Amino acid sequence: MRPDPFSVAVVQDDARAVVTVRGELDLATAPELEAALLPGLREGGSAVLDLRGLEFMDSTGVRVIVAAHLAAQEHGGALTVVRTIPDGAVARVLEISGLDEVLDIVDDV
């Protein structure tokens, strides 16, 4: 079975951007997420990163999430991450990288 094609959708609500990713986040697709997520955080905005539709993430995806977390901290914004499928591949990457202990992780948008 082929994975879903990668996509990033951004919906701006009152105080934050909700960024939803689907498919595989890797070296080829990470720049698309970075372009959607980081500029607002660097301007002091807040974002919710919804990873529930993500099927795979490599270290490049981890780098983007770390950069987003740091941008939010440095510029007075906030990054919240919606929890992925427990025991799934993406949850495992977040656990191995230690990000599950650092990020503000919630169950729903």
Image (spheres, rainbow, N blue to C red):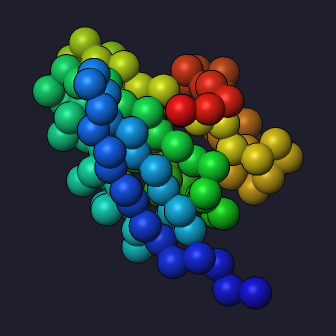
Would residue 9 be found to the left or right of residue 97 on screen?
left
Query: Compared to 19, does 16 lie above or below?
Result: above
The residue shown at (25%, 12%) is 76
Residue farthest along the front direction in this orientation: 14
Would residue 70 be found to the left or right of residue 44 on screen?
right
Q: Position of residue 54 (x, y in %)?
A: 60, 58
Residue 74: in sight, yes or no?
A: no
Q: Position of residue 85 (x, y in %)?
A: 76, 47
Residue 14: in sight, yes or no?
A: yes
Residue farthest along the left direction in this orientation: 43
Q: Quadrant of the C terminus?
A: top right
Q: Position of residue 5 (x, y in %)?
A: 51, 78
7 vs 109, nearest the viewer: 109
The residue shown at (54%, 54%) is 59
Location of residue 37 (image quadrant): top left
Q: Position of residue 30 (x, y in %)?
A: 39, 60
Q: Quadrant of the N terminus?
A: bottom right
Query: Compared to 29, does 64 lie above or below?
Result: above
The residue shown at (55%, 20%) is 104
Residue farthest along the top direction in this orientation: 76
Would residue 5 be found to the left or right of residue 88 on screen?
left
| Total labels drawn | 0
